Image (cartoon, rainbow, N blue to C red):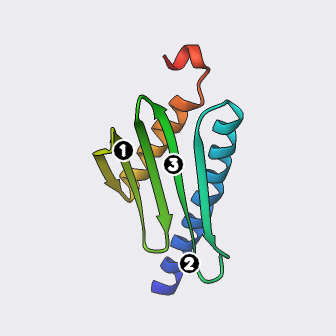
Amino acid sequence: MFPRLAEQYRSVVQDLVISLQALSLSLQARGLAATCYTCGDGRDGQGASFVANLGENHMVRFLVSDFGISWVESRDGHELVKLEGAEAIQELQRVSEVLQQPVAAAL
């Protein structure tokens, strides 16, 4: 059972890495500041660090790896929110939906 669960988690990490890369490119194409750095080759583990600027010194960072998943939101260099696991993924989904809306609708 445990090897199967480990493989499922690796699959989730791989899916998140691909989604973060796509989200970063989509936001960049819209002129928003967003980056996604990846590490690993998928065989010995994989991970990514996604960072997006929400404006007015408001940043979000989403980290995913074989070691865990976390979301950190900060303003003016001060941490506002830190979420992990499923809550981090849900917050990423919520913010990505807002960021991908047309500019007039997002305001």
The dot on residue 85 is none
The dot on residue 51 is 3
Query: Which three-letter amino acid code belongs to the residue tagged 1?
Result: Glu
Q: CA distance from mark 2 to mark 3?
A: 26 Å
> x, y percentage for residue 42?
65, 75
Q: Give the answer, above or below, for where 95 lies relative to 49.
A: above
> x, y percentage for residue 45?
58, 78
Query: Which three-letter amino acid code belongs to the residue tagged 3?
Result: Val
The dot on residue 73 is 1
Name the N-terminal-most of marks 1 and 3: 3
Q: Which residue is mark 2?
A: 7
Residue 1 seen by the camera: no
- What's the residue at 47%, 45% (across, down)? 92
Name the N-terminal-most of marks 2 and 3: 2
Task: Please identify the quarter of the rendering in which residue 70 is found.
Answer: bottom left
- What's the residue at 67%, 76% (across, down)? 41
Image-based side of 33 in relation to 71, left or right:
right
Q: Give the answer, above or below, for where 63 lies relative to 82.
A: below
Is disc 3 placed on a helix, strand or loop? strand
Count of numbered circles in the view: 3
Q: Give the answer, above or below, for where 79 lies relative to 14.
A: above
Mark 2, Cα crowd under 10 Å, few <14 / some 14-19 / many 20+, is few
Image-based side of 75 in relation to 25, left or right:
left
Between 73 and 20, the one nearer to me in the picture: 73
- What's the residue at 63%, 44% (across, down)? 23
Image-based side of 70 in relation to 12, left or right:
left
